[in-house]
Amino acid sequence: MIDVSLLSVIRRWYFRDGLSQREITRRTGLSRNTVRRYLKSDIAEPAYPQRDLQSKVKAFEEVLISWLKREARQRRKERKTVKNLYEDLLPMGYSGSYDRVAAFVRKWREEQRLTASNQVYVPLEFAAGEAFQFDWGENYAFIDGRKTKLQVAHFKLSHSRAYILRAYPTQSHEMLFDAHNHAFRVFNGVPERGIYDNMKTAVDKVQRGKERIVNRRFLTMVSHYLFEADFCNPAAGWEKGQVEKNVRDARSIIWQRLPRVSTLTELNDWLEAQCIADWQSRKHPQFTDRTIEDVWYQEQRQLMKVTAPFDGFIEHSKKVSSTCLVSFDRNRYSVPASFANRRISLRVYPSRLSFIAEGQQIAEHPRSFMVNHDVPGKVIYDWQHYLLVAQRKPGALRNGAPFNTMPDSFKHLQSILLQRARGDKEMVEVLSLILHHDEADIVKAVEMALDAGCPSKQHVMNCLSRVITPPQPAPIPIGSSLQLITEPTSDASRYDTLRGKRHAH
């Protein structure tokens, strides 16, 4: 089938320019029969033959429609593709082509779109301090020179339209809780109600109507901030249309101007500043004589003040390995050797991991995220966690992987001491000083010993005593009013007088 533009050229060549059908066939590469058919008929626009797309699909029409309705209720990223639906039809006896299934799906979706466009909605209006809306978005940013996929939390006050964005690596619980902490800090208060979709971090199960089985940890956060969580109907994004629109608008308002940053913290600081700057310049859509910031200042009075942020960790029970390591998210983190082969608690925060045993924090590490899931995970050591092992086995210093994370001055001292007899034990004794003194003081003492050319345990301890000994106070200046003017004279006779009185008694 030729297109309209080619048919127009053929007709112009033949009827106006007088070219023969043979010449037109040579120029276009079409068969002479095709050229003859279109020239003999009075057709100015090619017509495509109508095919019965329902011939083989019709028997599976009800099944396909039920599947399409089910997929429409799923989150966009969780929906099956048309190819997946076609492959699901094959075991059921479908013998038609993929194209017919795709054509049926396109037609059904177009009908649904037209039906939705004809729906009528009631404009919503919110009182000051009544509600906020929340949704996740997805964007990319260059962090530390690498293009990184981010999950962006969007909060928007429904009355003042003040909004805040904060980016995270994932949409997990601890990220969600941290986003609420920062949003309520920036808004300077908490509204009465929060409007959400049925995200898995909040809703364990969607039941009939408005009934939901809400995640217990999410309920704890809601109880802490004392607001009511309200969940939209499935596939009803218009019920939180303000924040849905904000997710789209933020791409042009903010993300198009996104700078390259070194850390995620730097990016979030920039996002917060940009949001607040936009409040100051953007007019409120309802109160057009005022900015969003002006309306937000008034709405603050109706918000409940935040007394303390929510401690939004997720807790896991973990077994410590014989090498004093705990596995999490394909990475491994060290804990003190005294807890090897024991079970402890791991509290997961957005940017750090806290290890708890016997009611106390025994270790803390910055959280590491996997950039490339095709490579093995990292091992994050704290060399101090292995001091107990080194005291029993000084030889472990020579090739112990955790001790590669020591300060450079310690490594330099170690390279010198290990060349001596029993140098490994002497080095362990130097490292053990950290159990009783501040690490910075010991680093300074080691540097002093190395600079003096006396790298030994005794000299390090001598330098440490000088580092931790407070300096002598400066003498107090004497004022001129206390200076001696008349020098006293010596008179020993007074003592003889006193001596005589004593013997008289």
Image (cartoon, grey):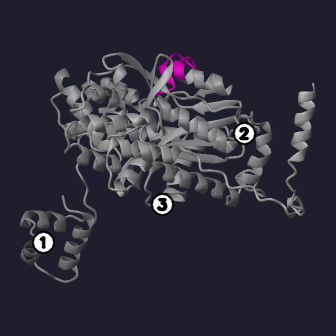
The residue at which mark 1 appears reads as 28
Closer to viewer: mark 2 or mark 1: 2
Could you say which is closer to the camera, residue 422 or residue 343? 422
Q: Secondary structure at mark 3?
A: helix
User: Within the magenta stretch, is there residue 206?
Assistant: yes
Q: Are marks 1 and 3 in contact (CB under 8 Å)?
A: no
Q: What residue sits 61% from the left and 26% below the top? A: 230
Q: Which stretch is magenta?
A: 200-217
Given residues 56 and 419, the one toward you in this image is 419
Disc 2, SS: loop
Q: Earlier in the sequence, mark 2 or mark 3?
A: 2
Which residue matches tag 3? 256
Q: Amino acid at mark 2?
A: Glu
Q: CA distance from mark 2 to mark 3?
A: 30 Å
Residue behind mark 2: 125
Residue 204 drawn above or below residue 169: above
Residue 382 at least partly seen? no
Count the marks: how many?
Answer: 3
The answer to whether residue 488 is magenta is no
Position of residue 168 in the picture relative to residue 32 (left or right): right
